[in-house]
Image: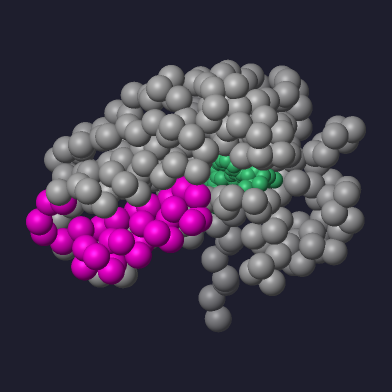
């Protein structure tokens, strides 16, 4: 009998080192922690679970049992008390010192209950994670269920053998993942990339060795889907494509339909992930999964 392999994820108690408003829609929170040196990343769109305290709490209230049954226990904890659980992406994991950067979208910041923001481009309702990042201070405590093995099941960008070119679309929430994918792509890989953001100031440098054609699209009004319009009207390269598309669920569904239905992409060569959905919190989305 062989021993079961150790789980690829582990709990980390981290604290905020510093925060920086890197663009109108994004706040970068840099985390540190004693054992952060054990965290590793598979790169690309590496995701993890973030656990935040609620207002008035010093630290997130986690299940007593942090073993494999933690999720079942989290679900039975009082929703008014238990940690806020959200999905985020490793923007960068550094050594000496061990630091983790996470970029948080500032949605709903300027408007409430769906009102448009000061630029007439409101990005919906605010949420606890977005708000937490905006008000985070050095020393604030969080917990993370993060990867401790490169092959950890939390990286979805997996182009199959025989891929000739790559298509990537993202909004602000998937911009950290798109940045990770671009920095990972092998030199010379042809890539068509569309990134949709709220403000011209959200455009950032995305270093890559790929042969990437990156188009930035600025949303005019809430509800616009410029990325969908841009992909629909684009001339695409020939050869075997692999698509990775992430962002608002409705937009992603429409994009996937277009790529598979109108453009003839093999559905197995399209990785699509709804990172958020209009009108639904992450708890609502989890509840739908049962
Ligand atoms: C695998 C994965 C990786 C992700 N990585 C990142 C990341 O690195 N950075 C990041 O910022 N987000 C990321 N997200 C998205 C993030 O988890 C959601 O946006 C989440 O809903 C934010 O939680 P919240 O508490 O701020 O809002 P919630 O309480 O979940 O939602 C409150 C309201 O805000 C709306 N809303 C939620 N997100 C957005 C948004 N981005 N724009 C406009 N309205 C929104 C909802 O529709 C809802 O009406 C990722 C999601 C997944 C699945």
**In the picture provided, is 192 more to the left or to the right than 246?**
left
Q: Is residue 264 above or below residue 58?
A: below
Quadrant of the image for the N terminus? bottom right
- Give the residue displayed 67% in from the left and 30% down from the top: 111
Residue 279: x %, y % from top left:
64, 51
Ligand 1, image quadrant it occupies: top right
- Give the residue displayed 89% in from the left and 33% down from the top: 56
Residue 109: x %, y % from top left:
65, 28
Q: Is any part of residue 115 visible from this angle?
A: yes
- The residue positioned farthest toward the left in the image shown: 238
Residue 146: x %, y % from top left:
59, 47
Q: Is residue 157 above or below residue 104?
A: below
- Give the residue displayed 54% in from the left and 76% down from the top: 2
Residue 9: x %, y % from top left:
59, 54
Q: Is residue 36 above or below residue 276?
A: above
**Picture quarter containing residue 98?**
top right
- Give the residue displayed 52% in from the left and 38% down from the top: 222
Camera-side residue of 33 and 130: 130
Bounds of the magenta segment: 236-264
């Amino acid at each position: 009998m062989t021993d079961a392999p150790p789980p690829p994820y582990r709990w980390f108690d981290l604290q905020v080192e510093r925060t920086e408003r890197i663009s109108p829609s994004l706040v970068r929170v840099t985390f540190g922690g004693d054992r952060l040196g054990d965290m590793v990343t598979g790169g690309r769109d590496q995701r993890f679970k973030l656990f935040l305290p609620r207002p008035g709490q010093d630290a997130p209230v986690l299940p007593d049992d942090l073993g494999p049954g933690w999720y079942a226990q989290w679900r039975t904890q009082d929703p008014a008390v238990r940690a806020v659980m959200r999905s985020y992406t490793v923007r960068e994991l550094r050594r000496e010192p061990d630091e983790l950067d996470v970029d948080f979208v500032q949605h709903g910041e300027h408007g409430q209950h769906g009102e448009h923001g000061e630029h007439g481009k409101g990005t919906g309702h605010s949420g606890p994670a977005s708000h937490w990042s905006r008000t985070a201070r050095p020393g604030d405590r969080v917990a993370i269920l993060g990867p401790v093995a490169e092959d950890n099941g939390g990286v979805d960008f997996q182009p199959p053998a025989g891929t000739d070119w790559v298509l990537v679309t993202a909004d602000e929430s998937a911009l950290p993942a798109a940045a990770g994918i671009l920095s990972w792509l092998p030199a010379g890989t042809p890539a068509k990339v569309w990134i949709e953001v709220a403000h011209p100031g959200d455009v950032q440098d995305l270093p890559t060795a790929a042969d990437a054609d990156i188009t930035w699209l600025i949303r005019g009004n809430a509800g616009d889907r410029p990325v969908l319009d841009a992909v629909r009207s684009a001339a695409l390269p020939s050869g075997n494509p692999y698509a990775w598309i992430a962002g608002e669920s409705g937009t992603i569904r429409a994009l996937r339909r277009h790529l598979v239905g109108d453009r003839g992409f093999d559905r197995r060569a399209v990785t699509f992930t709804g990172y958020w959905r209009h009108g639904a919190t992450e708890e609502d989305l989890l509840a739908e999964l049962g």
